[in-house]
Amino acid sequence: MDTYRGHRVIHHPGVSAGFSSSITRFVDDKLTVIVLANGSRQVVDQLARRIAGLYVPTLASPTVGIPDPDATTSEILHQGLLGMISGKPDLNLFTPAMQRFLMSDNELSEWLASFGSLRSFVYAGSEPGGRDRSLLYRITLGDSAFTFSFTLTEQGKIAHAFFW
């Protein structure tokens, strides 16, 4: 469960050898998008959200080119992402739960790196939340463009990182 652009969303992505899938339900909008793909390198969450944006305009992908209100935080998040890609994150940037996730036996860094090097990291907006805040960035890994969302605690620690 999460929020996306202020909308409640329940989603579950899946990847196995040769296949990717995503079911994304925008609860309040009564919209569900299911994407199935032949290929494990596909980021189908991104496609599901783009499709949703066609039906509910407020779900459309954020635009690039808006001023970054906090360049210092953006630079910290940029470094956090670089660490995630390299498999050597600065754990001080993350909450204990994210630290455990990043240090667990997962293939996140290998998978992110498979797209290519980080070519751009541009502020694209924020999402409303409770005490935590979510900041959105348009990034380019190799030749692939994504929207990346970081949820920050009141203490400025990265509690969640999600991309589509």
Image (tube, rainbow, N blue to C red):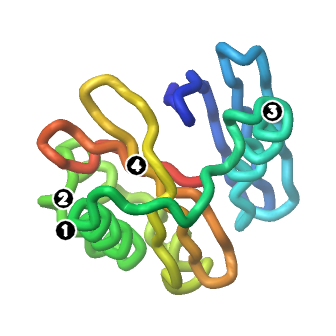
User: Looking at the rendered structure, which numbered label has been put on residue 93?
Assistant: 2
- Residue 38, horizontal then vertical, whole percent: 87, 59
Which of the two marks, 4 or 1, is nearer to us in this view?
Answer: 4
**From what the image shows, is residue 134 above or below residue 91?**
above
Which residue is identified by label 4?
A: 135
- Residue 46, horizontal then vertical, whole percent: 69, 52
- Residue 16, horizontal then vertical, whole percent: 70, 55
Left or right of residue 40, residue 54 in this image: right
Q: CA distance from mark 3 to mark 2?
A: 33 Å
Left or right of residue 10, residue 83 in this image: left
Could you tell me which residue is drawn at 36 percent across and 75 percent down?
82
Q: CA distance from mark 1 to mark 2?
A: 6 Å
Which element is circle 1 on?
Answer: loop
CB under 8 Å between discs 4 and 1: no
Which residue is identified by label 1?
A: 90
Could you tell me which residue is drawn at 17 percent across and 61 percent down?
91
How would you rate the neighbour count of disc 4 (Cα within 10 Å): few for under 14, some for 14-19, many for 20 or more?
some
- Amino acid tagged 3: Val
Front residue of 70/145: it is 70
Left or right of residue 79, residue 140 in this image: right
**Chain-order first, disc 3 or disc 4:** 3
Which element is circle 3 on?
Answer: strand
User: Looking at the rendered structure, which numbered label has been put on residue 140?
Assistant: none
**Chain-order first, disc 3 or disc 2:** 3
**Chain-order first, disc 4 or disc 2:** 2
Could you tell me which residue is drawn at 61 percent across and 63 percent down?
146
CB under 8 Å between discs 3 and 2: no
Front residue of 43/150: it is 150
